[in-house]
Amino acid sequence: SSPNMPTSAPSNHSSRPEDLIGKLNSAITPYEAKLKALRDLKNQIIGNRTKKLAFLKLGAVPSVAAILSDAAAAEGSGGDAWELHDSVLIQSAAAIGSFACGLDAGVKAVLDVGAFPLLLSLISHANDKVVDAGARSLKLIYQSKLAPKYDFFQEKNMEFLLSLLNSENENVTGLGASIIAHSCQTTAEQQSLSEVGVIKKLVSLLGGSLLQRDASLESLSAIIRDNQEVASKFVGTDNGKALNVMIELTKDKYSRTRLLACMCLISIRNTVSPYLQDLGIKNNLVITLLDLLDDPGQVGDESPFVFSSLITEKEDMQKLAFDANAVERMLEHLKKGSFHGKRLQGILLALADLCSKLECCRDRVLHLKVFDFAIDALAHDSAEVRTAACIFLKNISRSVKNLSAGYFMNETVILPLVQLLCDSCTSVQISALRAISNVVVDFKPHKSLFTQSEGVKHLVLLSKSMESAIRINAVCALKNLMFLANNRCKEEILLELTTSTLASLISDPEAAVQEQALAFVRNLISGTLNSIEYVFGEDDLLLHAIGRQLRSSYAYEVLIQGMYTLSNVASGNEFHKEAVMNQLFPSAGNETESILAKFLQSTDNRLRTAAVWTIVNLTFPSSPGACGRVSELQNAGIISMLKNMTNDPCLDVKLRVRMVLGQLLIFGDAST
């Protein structure tokens, strides 16, 4: 063709997808023509997602797999055309690999048509180029979560894996390592791989080609993760030389190698805590990962997730990251804006981790207006990004100071969060509920904004969800909204929720829902004397529900909340105190031991404290019926139990017990 041919010239008619598939499927197409069609197809789909999807719709994968199968069978029959057969094997394997590369729909099509065992059979082929093509395609399949899980416990499978790792062919060793990275998930799998000497083999690959090195790092990360024994074994390999090699690889010229080396070192650091505590190494990990954010490709997309694994739940690492200007570095990337959703998700999660413990990080994030990007991300197309934005808002609103300043209880934050309560994705709904739970604690009188935005209506609907995780978080949000709410706000919330729904939540099948519902009641009745009346509505419906849970539940968290709720009721007037006594000592009950006696003997400090607080409120000397209640407590053996608790191991319990005994002195004989 002429070198001056314009680049926009129409493609050859025979290269149209329909024509190429027609050639591949035709029984009369000569082998040479099929080979050319395979090459054309492969060249069209490489790196082109749209083309891949178009060919998938036309059934290209079954066509290519059929040719691969025919070529493999024909080779076994001998003949002179082996070079042509090998070329067909190479091109068809490469085409299948291209369909699987970065496209789950492609991987599914490849697996559905049964091409996987065909590719595996190519690994033992006599021609190295065929082996390369098969290994490369299988590696691409193993990058997907859809790839079949490898069973390491079958002896023949383990032997095959070791033969891959011991191969002279770098694509084959890379495949072996990819299988481990994909399929090694349990402690038993890590152990069995370690026992057959895989770690030593992978360490030797760290000195190999770029492909082998990266595959080895990925596999080592999978084998070491959360396994102290295997991680310690790696650290001890070659008297610690392997660890030093890995530390050096964090300075490698290839960005992917640096990322994978960081991943491995973080796995070791998080698993075997005495290692890698040197400040220089910690700083190196922080700075390397922040620098990797600048990578425009997949490495830049993955680096914030690896950064999160370094700092999550670790205040010392979060402080180092803060000092290395992590917030500013991430803000720079948020300002660029035009990047893959995965990177936005990663950056928001990394910022969420940074703000999980440190007030200085939250202040910096608010000061630099990073907040605004998170609000925009609540409306992102990707459910993962929406979830990450909610997690970020949940962590940044953990600050009492910022809640008091009223930064979060405004329409800009509340309206998009309330909208997400109707999201089609459950994980988004749960993350939005958790963010709302923090935001609505707001100490200023802004809670009415939430009721006006139909937030309460949505929370009540979600409290009836079939999904227990949604119910728990919805009731938790309602509980926090009820915290320090004024009377009008309490009325509005209870009107929407209803007493009967609240009573059924107290008796929910899930203990965690019961706990949150009881804590809701505790917040509902705290404050004024009038608030206590809520538990007596609809024939004492709530009070009876609380009593039932205290008599039947075995969950400490439920019993503690229930007991503190009764304690709050017992802080009320004479009528309220007598109602609590009736719950603690029901006249119709046939229990030999009262629940109060059980709780005073509990091994849980918090439950004993709650029980003693209730007694403090029931025996308050200025209340008219206190003397009668003291007699009743004495007859039930409660007073003598309290006298034996003056040296309780828990300081809180000890102080409250002494308070009760001090009150009892006023009643003279009643306390002896």
Image (tube, helix red, strand yellow):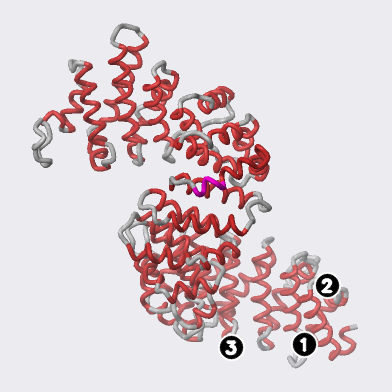
Relative height, residue 76 to residue 2 (above, below): above
Q: Which residue is mark 1?
A: 626
To which quarter of the image does residue 2 belong?
top left
Classify the position of the N terminus by image quarter: top left
Pointer 2: residues within 10 angstroms few (<14), some, or many (20+)? some
Measure how far apart labels 1 and 3 are at the Cα level. Answer: 21 Å
Q: Residue at x 46, y 78 (%)?
A: 495
- Residue 260: % across, % down: 49, 46
Residues 114 and 269: in front is 269
Q: Which label lies toward us, 1 or 3?
A: 3
- Residue 618: % across, % down: 74, 83
Q: Which residue is mark 2?
A: 648
Q: Residue at x 52, y 41 (%)?
A: 217
Q: Amino acid at mark 1?
A: Ala
Sooner in the amino-acid sequence: mark 3 or mark 2: 3
Say which element carries label 1: helix
Q: Which residues are magenta?
A: 247-251
Q: Which residue is mark 3?
A: 528
Sooner in the amino-acid sequence: mark 1 or mark 3: 3
